[in-house]
Image (spheres, grey):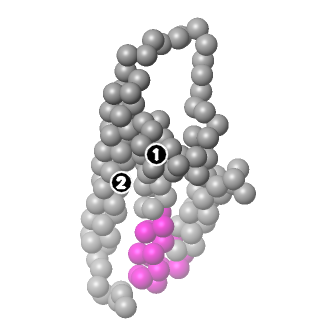
Amino acid sequence: MFKRSDWTDQDVEIIIANLLRAGVVVSAAIVLAGGLIFLVRHGFDPANYRVFKGEPTDLRQFRGIARAALALHGRGIIQLGLLFLIATPVARVAFAAFAFSIERDWLYVGISTFVLLILLYSLLGSAI
């Protein structure tokens, strides 16, 4: 399907740069949309700075974030955008492992895969 001669190092760098750029732009757009929805609904609510209130427990797991985002709740959409932002470098490492496998550079495939596993464990390890 893919041959080693199909891609140059510069092609891989351009794809990675576009992947990172697209991830940041998409996540920023999602966060902006969620922020606007949140401000429209809660912009005039009085702020209470005496008591710290963190995110609700349902917005600390993917299911709750997805449910809130689908219900068009501002906080849920903002959290979804942040998840996209976190997923962007993970996708970059996964693509690097794929690109190195096409080039048959097995040392870097192993290193990229190891880094990817560490990233996934750090993100999903508490959920397992």
At mark 1, the secondary structure is loop
Q: Which mark is residue 71?
A: 1
In the rendered image, residue 26, in percent from the top left (x then y), is placed at 33, 51
Query: Dot 1: few (<14), some (14–19), or many (≥20) neighbours within 10 Å?
Result: few
Looking at the rendered structure, the kind of residue marked 1 is Ala
Task: Point out residue 17 in the picture as x, y percentages from the top left corner.
Answer: 30, 59
Q: Is residue 94 magenta?
A: yes
Question: In this view, which residue lies farthest toward the top?
Answer: 50
CB-based contact (under 8 Å), mark 2 and mark 1? no
* Quarter of the view holding residue 57: top right
Give the label on residue 23, or none: 2
Using the image as rendered, state which of residue 52 and residue 97 is in the foreground: 52
Camera-side residue of 122 and 82: 82
Disc assigned to residue 12: none
User: The disc labelled 2 sits on which kind of residue?
Assistant: Gly
Q: What separation in Å lies between label 2 and label 1 (alpha carbons)?
A: 23 Å
In the rendered image, residue 91, in percent from the top left (x then y), is placed at 45, 62
Around disc 2, counting alpha carbons within 10 Å, would you say few (fewer than 14), some (14 to 19), or many (20 or more)? many
Q: Which residues are magenta?
A: 93-108
SS class of the residue under badge 2?
helix
Percent position of residue 111, x then y: 56, 68
Residue ID at (42%, 43%): 72
Q: Main secondary structure of the magenta part?
A: helix
Indicate which label's residue lies in the foreground, 2 or 1: 1
Query: In the picture provided, is 105 more to the left or to the right than 40?
Result: right
**Quadrant where the C terminus is found in the figure:** bottom right
